[in-house]
Image: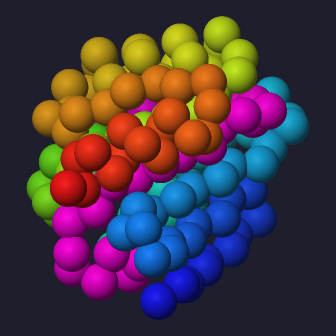
Amino acid sequence: MEEMIIYEHASFWTDSSGVIFCKFKSLNAHNKLDYKIAELYIEAISKLSNGVPMPLLIDLRDTKGTFSIAAAQLLANSFNNLSLIISEAYVVNSLSINLLIRSYKRLYDTSIPYAVFDDMSTAEKYCLEFKN
């Protein structure tokens, strides 16, 4: 069953592959993901997973911005405690977002396996390997 949840700067969806997809779309470098919005995103992921652990594929190509410390802590704690995300694949095309992801993963020490890719097909294969 395909389902989609759309917010101002992000879209979440799942399809028959059993992967939760997320596409961020913000071209404003001053945009910052805050705690309140992070809560909405976690609720969307929880709703789409229907309680079934799934891989998460996050498309950050052509995205600019950062996140607040509170939002980063909430995301890290939620992903570690919810057990709904079995792996994370990030798709990027800029050094700044690549560094942001790697810094987040290093600082907040999430236990979920992750990888950073520069194309969707490789990232999706990574997700499907974890699912199977």
- The quadrant holding residue 26 is top right
Q: Is residue 76 above or below residue 54?
A: above
Give x and y (percent) for residue 84: 22, 63
Q: How is the image coloured?
A: rainbow
- Give the left or right position of residue 95, taking residue 52 as reference: right
Q: Is residue 84 above or below residue 129?
A: below
| Residue drawn at 49 percent across, 72 percent down | 14
| Residue drawn at 15 percent across, 35 percent down | 111
- The quadrant holding residue 110 is top left
- Give the left or right position of residue 108, taking residue 48 as reference: left
Q: What segment is highlighted magenta in the picture?
A: 47-73
Q: Residue furthest bottom?
A: 1
Residue 37 falls within the magenta-colored stretch: no
Residue 61 appears in the figure: yes
| Residue drawn at 21 percent across, 66 percent down | 53
Give x and y (percent) for residue 106: 29, 16
Q: Nearer the viewer, residue 110 or 125?
A: 125
Q: Nearer the viewer, residue 109 or 49?
A: 49
| Residue drawn at 56 percent across, 71 percent down | 13
Q: Is residue 13 above or below residue 120?
A: below
Residue 63 falls within the magenta-colored stretch: yes
Q: Quadrant of the C terminus?
A: bottom left
Tell me how many marks there are.
Answer: 0
Residue 66 appears in the figure: no
Q: Nearer the viewer, residue 6 or 28?
A: 6
Give x and y (percent) for residue 38: 48, 56
Q: Nearer the viewer, residue 116 or 41?
A: 116
- Give the left or right position of residue 8, taking residue 95 as reference: right
Q: Is residue 8 above or below residue 22?
A: below
Give x and y (percent) for residue 42: 40, 64
